[in-house]
Image (cartoon, rainbow, N blue to C red):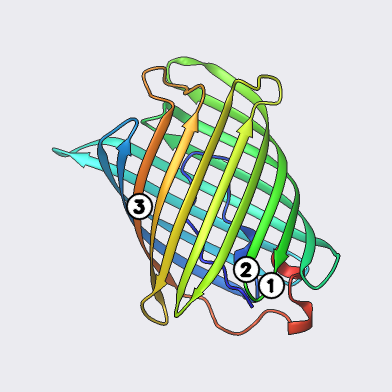
Amino acid sequence: MVQASNAKTPVSDTRTPSPCVYLNTPFNLKLRFDLSELKLGNGPRINGGGNVQFQQNFGDLAYIVEASAQYLNVDGKTVNGRYTFVGRVDKPLLRFSDDFTLSLAGITTAAYDKVLGLEPRVTAGGGPWLDYVTELLCNGFSIFPIMEHERGGGAPDKLTLRLSARNYLHIPLGEGADFTLDSFFAPSATDFEDYRASVIPGLAFKISALASVNFGLVAEYNSKPRNPELKPFDLTGMASLILDLGPDEPAAKEEDKGVNGG
């Protein structure tokens, strides 16, 4: 059974961890420590941060909660503070075959981002998630309607209905190595010149029974930044240490594979 290595959850966005992480695990607790460098766009700068993530899978329902913080401290002053919370619930609906399943997800996110001028950004929404899961790969796709509220940045409060389209691909490479590719596009439902998009490739390597390291690039584009002084494009390099404290025993029988993919 494919076990997805969770890529970096983007800061201040409507994305959540992929439901592929629910597969074959009754519960899981992960700690992650990040070091990232903004190479192009609104940089250069170096960020450090951490993340805690808990998930539980009951077979017919799965949920995940996650909190993270990133900051850059210069001369005793925090010049780049980012804090996020994510909640997600997935309910399996249909299994079309051994490999294809459909589930319904509900999500909520909240983010305070000093650089982007978010005080905060809060989102809520949900919709269908389609999983394709085999022994060779895990691929999830969704299109969610999302209601987004933004405050801060010296601009009026903004309430936006967005369509959040996402594709998450995970491929195990053998010998404890995994490749992930997280692609995301979120246009406004009323103004298609207002959108955010990103592509995040990553490589994860298991270094012990509990620990792995993840290296990735985060390419993000925001057509209308809330802070008008910011550039629309950022390219960030990232390294993470992930401690996986969950059990190894499966949550469901092998014949049920794919149902819990969410």
**Picture residue at 78% right of the left edge, 58% below the top:** 103
**Picture residue at 74% right of the left edge, 76% below the top:** 257
- Badge 1 local density, few (<14 within 10 Å), some, or many (20+)? some
Q: Which mark is residue 238?
A: 3
Q: Which mark is residue 134?
A: 1
Residue 206's place in the image compared with 104, above or below, is: below
> Seen in the image, is 71 located left or right of residue 212?
left
Kind of residue indicated by mark 1? Thr
**Picture residue at 86% right of the left edge, 65% below the top:** 96
**Picture residue at 78% right of the left edge, 78% below the top:** 256
> Could you tell me how far apart the alpha carbons at marks 3 and 2 are, in whole angstroms?
23 Å
> Seen in the image, is 15 located left or right of residue 134?
left
> Seen in the image, is 244 located left or right of residue 148?
left
* Dot placed on the residue nearer the N-terminal end, 1 or 3: 1
Dot 2 and dot 1 residues touching (CB under 8 Å): yes
> Could you tell me how far apart the alpha carbons at marks 2 and 1 are, in whole angstroms?
5 Å
Q: Secondary structure at mark 1?
A: loop
Kind of residue indicated by mark 2? Leu
Residue 176's place in the image compared with 60, above or below, is: below
